[in-house]
Structure formats: structure tokens, C-alpha cells
Image (cartoon, rainbow, N blue to C red):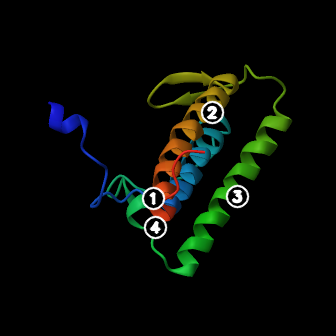
Amino acid sequence: MAAELSERSVEPSTLSLLGLVRHLADVERRWFRRVLAGQDAPPLFSSKTHPDGDFDGATSDPAVIAAGWQAWRTEVAFAERFVVEAPHLDIEGLDSWRGTVSLRWVLLHMIEEYARHNGHADLIRERIDGARGM
């Protein structure tokens, strides 16, 4: 057990900054378009047959990078409009995992989601530039 506690995260992990952007685009899309707005909006980067497509498909191709950022910006813009236009925070949507959820719950969940992935991003950034701490 002691050896596992000191294990470092290294390849072959597919976790990357672009993978996080693509993942968060799909997360925004799922909660705001599918669950709350009731739209038929399948994930952009992952699927049932390739659930890690958001990370596995994150390559250094400039077109892939641009598409990832554009998708994230589009989904965040939709979420922002949805929240502004919502009559109150208690509107509800049906989630296949959690049942009925409110806009309030989704907003809190998104704070948790971004906080978790910002921590991942900081570790990736440290690996890229070597800077640690503040």
C-alpha cells in the first residue's frame, strides 16, 4: 500500500489540457442542453463506443485545438444564456443518472466539476513548465 501512495501520474494517461477543454464542452452540453433544455444534443467528443474520445482525440492538430476551444465557447455561451433566461433556479430537468435535478443543483455541480478539473490542469501545467507552487 505504501508504494501506491507515492506513485506519480505519468503516461500512458491521456489526460491533457485540450482533453479537459473538450471534456468540459461535453459536460456543459450535457447538463444545459440535454438535461435542462431537453434538447437532443449528443456529446461532441465522446460516445458510448468511445467514452474517452474527449481525451483520446485531443491531438496537437491545429484544427482539433480550434474545434475544441470553439465547442467549449459555444457550450458555455448556451449555458450562460440559459441561466439568464431562466425564470428561477428551481426549474428542473430529468437526468438519466440522478433523476430530477434543478438549475440550482446543476450550477453547484458545475462549480465542483470545474474546480476538480482546474486541479488536474494545474498538475498538467506543472508538468509542462516545471513551475511549482505560487
User: Alpha-carbon distance for marks 4 and 2?
Assistant: 23 Å
Residue located 62% across and 73% down the image: 66
For residue 111, the mark is 2
Which numbered disc flags the more N-terminal residue, 1 or 2? 1
For disc 1, the marked residue is: 54
Q: Looking at the image, is 114 positioned above or below residue 91?
A: below
Residue 5 falls left or right of residue 47: left
Front-most of residues 99 and 110: 110
User: Alpha-carbon distance for marks 4 and 1?
Assistant: 7 Å
Q: Residues within 10 Å of mark 1 (few under 14, many from 20)?
A: many
For discs 1 and 2, the disc positioned in front in the rendered view: 2
Q: Mark 2 is on which residue type? A: Ile
Q: Mark 1 is on which residue type? A: Asp
User: Alpha-carbon distance for marks 1 and 3?
Assistant: 15 Å
Q: Secondary structure at mark 3?
A: helix
Which numbered disc flags the more N-terminal residue, 2 or 3? 3
Residue located 56% across and 57% down the image: 21
Q: Mark 3 is on which residue type? A: Arg
User: Alpha-carbon distance for marks 1 and 2?
Assistant: 20 Å
For disc 4, the marked residue is: 58
For disc 3, the marked residue is: 73
